[in-house]
Amino acid sequence: MEKLLLELVTPSECIFSGEVDTVVIPGKEGELGILPGHCPLLTEIVPGELYFRKNGAENRLAVGEGFVEIVPTQVSILTDLAISEENIDEKKVEEAVRRAEVAMREGHMKEEELAFVRANLEKSIAQLRLKRRRYTRGGLP
């Protein structure tokens, strides 16, 4: 079976580099599934869950905003956040969500500040969804 080379990079580190069977990324129009041989594409990713399959095992990460370049044999992702479920501190993320919601309700922000708070809220929600996914499937955190 053909494979894809997946490179997942944040500004601070290379999170993953290796061969995978499939990749699914969160996009503005919904999820984008990528198989070997996919047509070339450059697009944005939005905060959400990214997952890939490697030898039958599924790996999931919460990701932030970024870009993905797809060619038939490779997927290169540059994002400002990529974190696995086991590295998410649920209490800290819940607190970040609360702070963002309070700040947005108060409404004393300039447009740039509001955009920053919204972006952080979206990333926090993506992390909580991934962290809580295991609870809904009966697994342990």
Image: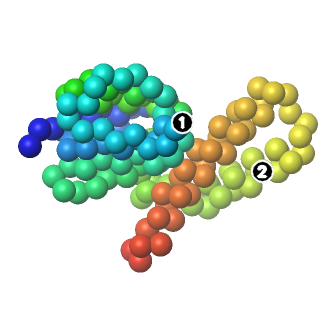
Residue 67 relative to residue 127: left or right: left
The quarter of the picture where residue 74 lies is: top left
Relative depth, front residue between 28 and 104 = 28
Three-letter residue code for mark 1: Lys
Image x and y of residue 45, in percent: 48, 34
Residue placed under numbered mark 2 in the picture = 101
The quarter of the picture where residue 31 lies is: top left
Mark 1 to mark 2: distance in Å?
A: 22 Å
Quarter placement of the N terminus: top left
Residue placed under numbered mark 1 in the picture = 28
Identify the residue shown where x is 75% and y is 47%: 100
Looking at the rendered image, the disc whose residue lies closer to the viewer, 1 or 2, is 1
Badge 2: few (under 14), some or many (20 or more) residues near its Cα, within 10 Å? Answer: some
Image x and y of residue 102, in percent: 82, 50
Image x and y of residue 122, in percent: 62, 44
Q: How many marks?
A: 2
Kind of element beneath mark 2: helix
Three-letter residue code for mark 2: Glu
Relative depth, front residue between 26 and 97 = 26
